[in-house]
Structures are given as structure tokens and as C-alpha cells.
Image: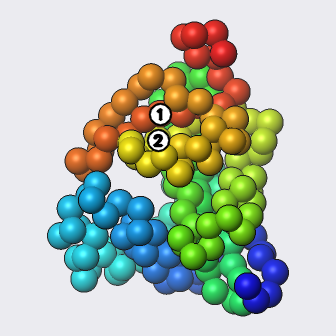
Amino acid sequence: MGSPLTVRLARVEDAAQMAWVHVRCWQETYRGLMSDAVLDDPSLPAARERFWTVALSDERYRRNRAAVAERDGKVIGIAMSGPPPDAAAEWVRQLHLLYVRAADHGTGAGPALLRAVIDPTESAALWVADPNPRAQAFYRKHGFIADGVVQVEDGVREIRMVRGVRTPDGC
């Protein structure tokens, strides 16, 4: 598989590679759940690069944590968390995204990225596409459980999963 996996904090100079991974993972993960017109839009990589440049450089996002997983000097995974959007939330971190290229699933990149952006002792929440059994199983393995809340974002059904938070069933 090449050199060892490295996980580190993301830097603004990583924005182009992060954008490429972001788009590639969307195409691998959401084909059939999202519109092909969105996934194959030629402007998508540039839009994601602008997103990452702002997320990594703008003072408004200073409380976010962003990390990359790389192998052989190439970014193969990305993750970002931040404070919950709702100040009344029962958790302290919100996982905004975690993507690892399909070719690198099972290499330890996902768990390492999750630990890099959310301390294992922190309560946290995330939204995950449904259906997305692989991702949902990954998050369950790391202590997250579905709390019954569902939303539709950009035409994609998502379920909320939480960790370290009491749910209505008492868990």
C-alpha cells in the first residue's frame, strides 16, 4: 500500500487536494442518492476548493477542526468537525464530514481522521446519508447511535447519530 498513513491538521495549502478527495468521495458514495448533474458538474471541484480555502483560513471557522489523511504525499481522506450549530445541543462537537477514498477503506484512515477532529471523550453528533450502511456501521463501531431524527438535505435523506448523549430510549 506504499508509505505509512499520516493524519495531520489540514492547512490552507491542502485545499486543492482536499477538494479533489471531497468530490471523488461524493461521486463514490452518493451516486444514485444525489443527482448525477450535481456529482458530475465540472464546476464542483472549484467550488469545493473555494469551500476548503474559506474553511481553513477564515476567522469565522477558527473553532472547527479539520484534518487530512495522506499516504505517499497525497491526501486520501478528509474530516472536519465544529461546534454544534444549535447552542442548545446536548453534544459539544458536530462532525461535519469525514470522507476516505473507496480505494483506502479499511486502512485505518477513517478512525484516525475521526479521532483527529473529535476527541473520543467528547459528546458528538453527525448526519449520515440513509441508506449508507457502510458509513452507518462505521459510526456505530465508534459509539454513535441513531437518535431517530431524520432530515432531507439537498434531496438526500439523512439520519442523525449521536455519541455520549442520552437518547429518548435512555442509552
| Residue lying at the far left of the rendered structure | 37
Residue 129 located left or right of residue 5: left
Reply above or below: 65 against 103.
Answer: above
Residue drawn at x 74%, y 64% is 108
Image marks 1 and 2: residues in contact by CB distance under 8 Å: yes
Dot 1 alpha-carbon crowd within 10 angstroms: few under 14, some 14 to 19, many 20 or more = some
Is residue 143 at all visible to an observer of this figure? yes
Whether 92 is drawn above or below 21: the answer is: above
Find residue 10 and report its horizontal and vertical position in percent. 65, 71
Residue at 74% across, 36% down: 122
Q: Quadrant of residue 99?
A: bottom right
**Residue in the image at 62% along x and 73% along y:** 104
The amino acid type of the residue labelled 1 equals Arg
Q: Is residue 57 visible?
A: no
Q: Find numbered disc 2 in the image and state the secondary structure of the residue it sits on.
A: strand
Q: State the residue position of label 1.
A: 160
- Residue 91's x, y, as percent? 62, 29
Image spot of residue 146 (x, y percent): 52, 29
Mark 2 sits on what residue? 127
Q: Estimate the spatial distance between the alpha carbons at disc 1 and disc 2, rounded to whole Å.
A: 5 Å
Q: Which amino acid does label 2 sit on?
A: Trp
Q: Where is residue 66 in the image (x, y as percent from the top left)?
A: 63, 62
Residue 37 falls in which quadrant of the image?
bottom left
Which quarter of the image is occupied by the N terminus? bottom right
